[in-house]
Amino acid sequence: MASTFANIGKVPELRQRLLFTAGMLAVYRLGIFVTVPGVKRSLMQEWLQQQQSTLFGMFNMFVGGALEQASVFSLGIMPYISASIIIQLLTVVVPTLERLSKEGEQGRKKITQYTRYGTIALSVIQGTIIASNIESMAVNGESVVVFKGFGFKILTILSLTAGTAFIMWLGEQMTERGIGNGMSLIITCGIVAGLPQALLRTQELVSKDMLLPLDLLIIAVVAVAATMFVVFVERGQRRIPVQYSKRVVGRKMYGGQSTHLPLKVNTANVIPPIFASSLLLFPATIAQFFPDSSVVQEIQGALQSGWGHNVIYALMIIFFTFFYTAVIFKPEDVADNMKKYGGYIPGIRPGKRTAEYIDRVLTRLTTGGALYLAFICLVPSVLVGYFANLPFQFGGTALLIVVGVALDTVSQIESHLITRSYEGFAKGARIRGRRVGA
């Protein structure tokens, strides 16, 4: 491992990419502490401490604490992620977008442009909501905003929208000139930024005998085991063998080779837990604005904790896993492309039969993937219910994001090393997907 890290410094391009990525992440973290004009940061932090179990608390985790700092980066990269998901969903129902998705590089550039426009539009909408909410916030009777009014709202909306546009530019620059996916690295950076605070909080609990050493050992074992399990499943894939028939074009013969179609166990990635968490936390957020409504408070209490919360959360994750997988992966399109280029699955007739076979395998894989996501996301709930005041930061959605981004980044670094005849992180082998039966 030490020699592998030493080899990274020997590859000029890889070294420059890593330094560039680190520099862009440093710029992002510095921007977290640039406060929106007219907001009292200390009061904002105190108010958000009371909202940890609501949508504001989860949102603050994903933006790396920018919301509690009342930062110009308070929206983070989430508008871009939302816009990307909306464009993906619209691609299924809007023929124009569907045609663009099949037009290669030019089509992808056009879709990326639409995603940017959607990001700005969502930033303006979300910025308007946050500006209105901040203006109405008060802690112990003291307003969070210094000067209220239309001017504050406009200034806040412009600041938050500009902040999101700048983060989007940072992410695209990291993707193009750095290592890994820039957008994913920005989210991961925000999540990891909460680790030191969680460790300090854990130390305080141990020193006050609120957390026993045995409890700490159990937490560490569960965290390591959960991380290993996530790595194990995320690398799992079902490789369907594909054979291409020989064909003659002019004087050259093409095809005849054997390859495989990789299907991941977790095709939907981290999108289902994000959807499910947002919908479950939404009633808790709404309840903050209707403190006198008994109906809203009862719904909020039922969905916030307990076995009912866990069951609904798991069922929503399973539903969104199947839904999102069906949106992003089309067995019919895969079968048609294979047939167009002379490919077939041994023992399966091309066309409709191939699509049915792929769909059957994908359904069985998705079932396992959905149960896996539900299990991983329920681990923190169980720990929080067992250990009081547990500062558990890397469970559920956060764990999936961090591990997934880490695997992708390591894989890209390894590719750069191997193409220049250096050994990767795994001696004598590359970090590949693990075969699973289905």
Image: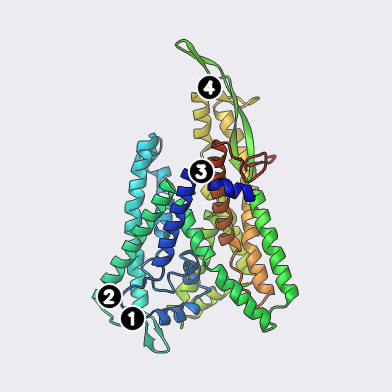
Q: Does residue 115 show up?
A: yes
Q: Is residue 61 above or below residue 142?
A: above
Sooner in the amino-acid sequence: mark 4 or mark 1: 1
Q: Which residue is mark 3?
A: 11
Q: Which mark is residue 342?
A: 4
Q: Which mark is residue 145?
A: 1
Amino acid type for the residue under numbered disc 4: Gly
User: Which label sits in the foreground, 4 or 1?
Assistant: 1
Sooner in the amino-acid sequence: mark 3 or mark 1: 3
Comparing 124 with 429, the one in front is 429
Q: Position of residue 358 (x, y in %)?
A: 59, 35
Q: Quadrant of the C terminus?
A: top right
* SS assignment at label 3: loop
Q: Position of residue 304 (x, y in %)?
A: 57, 72
Q: Quadrant of residue 306?
A: bottom right
* SS assignment at label 4: loop
Residue at the (70%, 83%) spot, across then down: 209
Amino acid type for the residue under numbered disc 1: Val
